[in-house]
Image (tube, grey):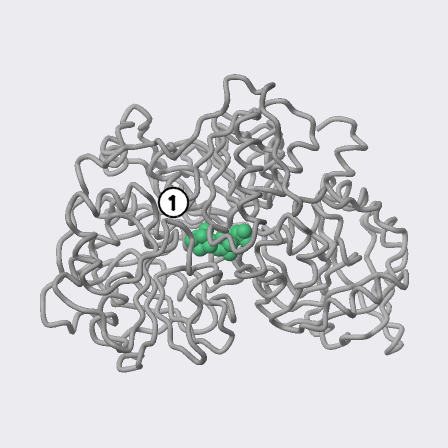
Amino acid sequence: MSKTLTQKILERHLVKGVYEPGNEIGVRIDQTLTQDATGTMACLQFEAMGIDRVRTDHSVSFVDHNTIQIGFENADDHRYLQTIAAKYGIDYSRAGNGICHQVHLERFGRPGTTLLGSDSHTPTGGGIGQIAIGAGGLDVALAMAGEPFYLTCPRVIRINLVGRLSSWISAKDVILKILEIFGTKGNVGCIFEYSGPGVKTLTVPERATITNMGAECGVTTSIFPSDEQTRDFLRAQAREEEWEKMDADPNAEYFKVMEINLSELVPLAATPHSPGNISTVRELEGMEVNQVCVGSCTNSSYRDLMMVAKILKGKKVHPNVSFILAPGSKQVVDMLAREGALADLLETGVRLEENACGFCIGNSQSPQTDAVSLRTSNRNFLARSGTKSASVYLVSPETAAAAIITGKITDPRDLDFSCPEVAMPGEFIVDDSMIIPPSDDPAGIEIYRGPNIGEPPSNDPLPGNVAGVVTIKVEDNTTTDHIIPAGARMKYRSNVPKYSEFLFEVVDPLFYGRAREIRDSGRHNIIVGGLSYGQGSSREHAALCPMYMGVKAVIAKSFERIHTANLINFGIVPITFKNEEDYGKVDQGDELELPDIGEKIRTGETLIVKNRTRGLQFEVDCDLSERAKGIVLSGGMLSYIKNKKSI
Ligand code: MIC
Ligand code: SF4
């Protein structure tokens, strides 16, 4: 039987279930990655499992998010992560070495393998032919302990690339086009598999830009074949022996097939406040720009920054623009320095940030009030930049560079010079000295714990009846950035009681006070959401902090994949309206009851929501696998594991 590339890799790793789209399957995970903002909690959870060494082929702990370090908290977390890595057999990529996805692609990603990462942009690894999936920290901790990762066996969508990108158009425009077609919701349970003659025209970093931002469509992951381009990249990274040719069979069947002609693409932009709002740059041209930020795991490779350096060579940053650059990795900077491009960039008047997530997560370089900020990153959700009134447009490095020169949104094809060429180097500078290998004497390692690091909070089993108040009702496309902000608040990631104070801060700053009052009065908090609730990041704090505040159920029109898994892992029941119109039958402040919820989940009987305030009731769905039912009824994964007495 002909197979898709996805099927070939997943079947190689299948340990539970039958490969049949829609089924729950468990797969072995070869590699894991964690980053510091999700990693501390993941490591605390891993420690609680009582395993003495990670059981993956390779696990890496990256420090790239919280590198601003205002106060002691993040520096303490980094030290904790370093000691955990040394003790448990994990490579530790120090702050300054680069963004997890960029560094993982350069140094560790391997065709044909599985990678699970506690960050939603882990699919970047799909650019090198890996099945690379983002998940909550607890799921990654379980994978580090050698447990399978459970997912819905995906429906594979083939994206057939034909043609070749024209000058001034790049990989970012490809993924923005895909976002225009597929949108940010409705793609749960799918994988994008790229194929066709256009594939060989794209280098690995270009492919990685495309798979990285596939995350914004809500697919499980995206993957490119592993071919001669992949081999060239691995050779240039001095690890050609890790190459393996991987491709789909010629007659493989797909859930859907879609063709994109690369030659027809034009410069595109995602307009505020969603990566799914796509316009052509032409439609936006002339708009004055206050800030341009280049970097993030989407567009910070050697190819991208070299392109920006070449476009800007000999020019100055427009006086009204603040130009921020956050390189993806130390390797990228070393390369730019060797080739003189770093000096060219510095001459323009750039403001250089560390090799880290930087501006992307909103903990630095927040733009001015009402600013127009052009960014090469992947998310422009309301307030993510740190400035609620700012309008963030997501663009390619070429479009960003054009605005740095002109001070306005400019179609780069209108610049009065031709597009520079950037060739991939035959050899990258390989210096892994900022990756600290695990200790040879793990017993001798004492774990460092700063005062901001708390125990992961526990939860009680799900009560027989849930009865409480709708503490908040939110709209369609509520992202995890809305549920719990990152940016300046992220330094409390290891301190759940403190971090919980910022729940829904962007949407409704009074949420925390209300939730506390309801919880402390012995009632349950219930959240009501619209379509695609929990879009965006993998941050499990968007479930963990609500759990801490006594949220027992979220009733929404639909959910996104990672957030659903996180809710289940923390014992919060994800419930969907049977009829979307019933969303109108509940309001914030309504008293709700879900009678016999425990029993009904166990038996699969239809769940009823009684709205005591309005005197009406309606049916809802709670479609959980047997395993997920067990977890939710136990009050979350940690209690589930404890009850099973083993993992
Ligand atoms: C993001 O881009 O939103 C983050 C910050 O990288 C998150 C992870 C986190 O919240 O720590 C993600 O994408 O998963
Ligand atoms: Fe970091 Fe931004 Fe990428 Fe998230 S999206 S991993 S914050 S660079």
Residue drawn at (64%, 48%) of the image: 494
Residue 443, above or below 178: above
Q: Quadrant of the N terminus?
A: top left
Q: Is residue 255 visible?
A: no
Please tell me which residue lies in front, 186 or 243: 243
- At label 1, the amino acid type is Gly
Residue drawn at (17%, 63%) of the image: 312
* Rendered location of residue 204, percent (x, y): 29, 43
* Rendered location of residue 286, percent (x, y): 26, 82
Residue topped by disc 1? 98
Classify 10 Å Cα crowding around label 1: few (below 14), some (14-19), many (20 and above): many
Q: Picture quarter containing residue 279? A: bottom left
* Rendered location of residue 32, percent (x, y): 50, 35
Task: Decide if residue 55 is on the left or right side of residue 624.
Answer: left
Q: Quadrant of the C terminus?
A: top right
Task: Decide if residue 528 is on the left or right side of residue 109.
Answer: right
Q: Picture quarter containing residue 39? A: top right
Residue drawn at (74%, 72%) of the image: 582
